[in-house]
Image (tube, rainbow, N blue to C red):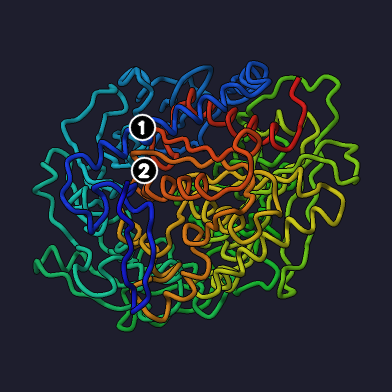
Amino acid sequence: MRQPFGYALHGERIEDPYHWLEGSAAPDAEPDPTLDANVARWTDEQNAYARGVLDALPGRAAVNEELEELLSLAAWGTPQEAGAWLFFTRRSGNEAQPVLYVAHGQNGPPRELVNVNTLDSSGQLALAWYEPSRDGRYVAFGTYRAGDENTTCRLLETQTGEWLADEIGGRVDPVDWLDDGRQFVVRRLADAANPYSGQIALHRLGRPSADDPVLFEQYTEGPLATTWGPAPIVDARGRWLIVAYYTGTDSNDLWCYDLDDWRRSGTLARRDLIVGKAALTTGFIDGDHFYAVTTEGASNKRVVVFDLASTHPERYRELIAMRADAVIVGIAPALERLVVDYLIDAQSRIEIFDRAGRRLCNVELPAIGSASIATHDERTVAWLRFENFAEPASLHRVDLTTGRTELWRRTELAPAGDEPPLVVAQVNYRSLDGTSVPMFIVHREGVRLDGSNPTVLYGYGGFDISLTPAFLAAWRPWLVRGGVYAVANLRGGGERGADWHRAGMLERKQNVFDDFHAAAEWLIARGFTCSERLGIRGGSNGGLLTGALLTQRPALASAAIVAVPLLDMLRYEHFLMARYWVPEYGSAQNPDQLPYLMAYSPYHHVVPGTAYPAVLVTAGENDSRVHPMHARKFAAALQAATASPPGEKPVLLRVDRDVGHGPGKPLALRIRDAADELLFMAEQLRLEIR
């Protein structure tokens, strides 16, 4: 029998009965050679139990067939133009991962450049990003394996496809090429095992990365040592370097460096642009000017300009004012133009301005939905990606002089036959404190508001991330059979600006859970569903969300998916890169923050004898963001505590050995995961699968 485990925090005794499931990753684990073996054996038993239940669910063959077709549809990435070349990714058929292609111009025949599927037949090698040099002669690209997101940068020559000897390791971010086509600025980790060792370096082709001059390193002490740290913004000439140093999840400092002075003197002299403000600022450099989008003095963001060559570069001027009805998502440079990406009620709108801040026109969008745009600072053409809940992604070429678009590629769905069309509605409902919260509801035409519809409610609510319309490929079999899918735009996200995000942070995190509870209650009150036919779904921070609803309102829903979740909020920061998130959640090491973390931490609110819903908890052993200990401990606690019959309301744990947080997962596993989730919900919410 395992000995009870507990610890003290600020004089309070915290019981942790499943502490042993943290394994040797626990910061206070005692040396024990059998510990990880016991965790592995327990995990194997959990996986076997989960697969036994999931594989026996009715309708798997039919759903698998549909999902294979839907998730195998040809899909293109947004193109990039460089020199005479057009670069894009495409995944088609049963390819496990997307392939990088290049073509001469828009209509040239595509040629394969990087095919990770042939480099690794297991499907575990993923292409994380690619960046062509400005003349298109070279391409830098990043790959990682088995979902660990520890990206390595390599290079190739576009014309020949030959790989260069250059290799840069350490979770490398997309690089910023200089005009000479032989140098780029790179953000990497000095130690791949230490997520708090960020550094900015200048790489030259042919030079060993160990010899690259390091321009900036993350602080090793103080509160800035464990944030996201430094991110580089550099101009193509390679004169100006701006370091955006993250001080929290909603703020960063901006420091400017003259690299020409550094080349002459060997010393980097820092000049402050924005320091010590509760504001998030980013942008691009054009010549001697830094065009920035910022929350400084503007919750919905505004565009300002800094003159980096002036004696007072910190004195910015406002170029585009904040709008009350729209949030600026980002800005992008084009020839003599500035493209501004807005979000209005969680839907995209893209507008074109001149460099004096005068609005010229809108970009024509195919419909209401989500759009993103890729521009080039020396061209008046751009590439638009668009999708919504009912239609898969399409790619369009944009004329930035008129805003008109021309279809380039579209993911084509099979003819619908006699299926009723899908209906998308956007509603606003009241949360517990009276706040109006938007929500999307998707269903097929003719749904009856009689409280009988199997309904899945999805949410996230954190880190300034907005949930916008996205094609529901994995849930289309659910929708065509009469199921309802709802997406709530909770506080903590970015749908309504920085204030909306901050309303769901730190001591205000309970607002997010209240918003989610209220969304469920609205769907029930309006006759879409009832508690017996309502399921909730979320992943990562959204897994914390569904875990909180389970433990705060266990009777509100009948089934829950808790994917790659944070659940032990008293110990989360001790694992992997989780100290990044202390500014978002708080720390149990802080006596002022422990009470509100303890008030909602899902693992600590599992109550024996409670009739919990059916629960599917998932995790990845290679997750570099959220440690699988959260999923293990929570699942074990729920299984021991629930008063629901396991045969009717099981608590399942699925831990994948060769995947991480989700990115880079091969096609076959994405199909399996989608089938698991859909069939689990169908069984519990009584959606008939034929």
Q: Are marks 1 and 2 in contact (CB under 8 Å)?
A: no
Q: Which mark is residue 159?
A: none
Q: Earlier in the sequence, mark 1 or mark 2?
A: 2
The image position of residue 677, as x and y in percent, is: 60, 34
Q: Quick check: 530 above or below 504?
A: above
The image position of residue 141, as x and y in percent, is: 32, 36
Describe residue 12's horizontal placement relative to residue 416 as left or right: left
Residue type at tag 1: Arg
Q: From the image, tell me which residue sits under label 2.
A: 623
Residue type at tag 2: Asp
Distance from Cα at disc 1 to Cα at disc 2: 10 Å
The secondary structure type at the circle numbered 2 is loop
Q: Nearer the viewer, residue 655 or 84?
A: 655
Q: Around disc 1, counting alpha carbons within 10 Å, would you say few (fewer than 14), some (14 to 19), or many (20 or more)?
A: some
Describe residue 39's horizontal placement relative to residue 460 as left or right: left
Name the residue at 79% across, 58% down.
Answer: 522
The secondary structure type at the circle numbered 1 is loop
Name the residue at 73% across, 55% down.
Answer: 520
Q: Which mark is residue 657?
A: 1
Describe residue 50's horizontal placement relative to residue 266 as left or right: right
Name the residue at 76% across, 49% down.
Answer: 531
The image position of residue 165, as x and y in percent, is: 16, 31
Q: Is residue 402 visible?
A: no
